[in-house]
Image (cartoon, rainbow, N blue to C red):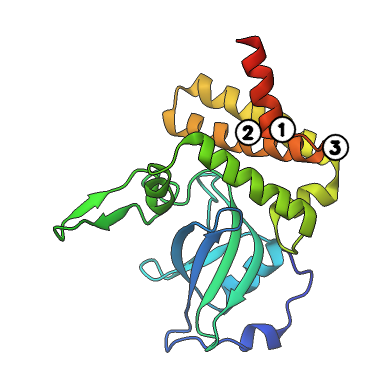
Amino acid sequence: MRLTTVSPEILDSFRYDDRGLIPGIVQDAGTGEVLMLAYMNRESLKRSLETGQTWFYSRSRQELWHKGATSGHVQHIRQVYYDCDADTLLVLVEQEGVACHEGERSCFHYRLNGAGEREQVEGGPLGAGLKENSLSEILTELFQVIRQRQAERPEGSYTSYLFNSGQDKILKKVGEESAEVVIASKNNKREEIIYEMADLMYHNLVLLAYHGLTIKDIAQELKRRR
């Protein structure tokens, strides 16, 4: 999402606090995972809408900052929502790399356990949920969502964007993600390998759906080879 022109009316339509700030909840557009919360002012919101990447306002440094400017972990904006009071933004993004400065996918990777004690959860809320499911269940559920996006093509969906762009775009992403897996492996970084491999698996599933194939087709071929 990138607006060539951002009118003053749009920027003035939100309810900023007495410091001129509005909280922005950043959510993964594909998985729905909450990645982080940061604050925007009028100027950072304007830059976010104009560039298609998230900009925030640092309350501690009192300056604008472009998410991922130094780390490369930028956030590509797909949709921007706001609540009924117009005092909170919900920004749906495609996240490159990780959102948290501690190296985790989501900033919300701590939780209170049953004893009221703090504990760290690898992968954040989404990772906690994945532990309760097998890989086959997760892939099956993901493929069902991909097939649904293929049929319905909802606006703002990254999966819809891939199908609308056609096979060449899908193949380009498969190639790019394959290269990212190779680079992550050469870097010997566990988290990078996991993240990039997940990206590759997702795009491979999109390619399967594009050709009308299913996970079952691949499973049968692997079974035949075994």
Observer able to see residue 3? yes
Residue ID for mark 2:
200
Mark pair 2, 3: CA separation: 16 Å
Residue ID for mark 3:
168
Q: Name the foreground residue: 110 vs 134.
A: 134
- Residue 208: where, in percent of width, then height? 75, 35
SS for tag 2? Answer: helix
Q: Is residue 108 left or right of residue 203?
A: left
Q: Are marks 1 and 2 in contact (CB under 8 Å)?
A: yes
Q: Is residue 141 above or below residue 89?
A: above
Disc 2 marks a residue whose amino acid type is Leu
Disc 1 marks a residue whose amino acid type is Val
Q: Is residue 27 above or below residue 206?
A: below
Point 62% across, 88% down: residue: 12
Give the quadrant of the C terminus: top right
Quarter of the rendering containing residue 221? top right
Residue ID for mark 1:
174
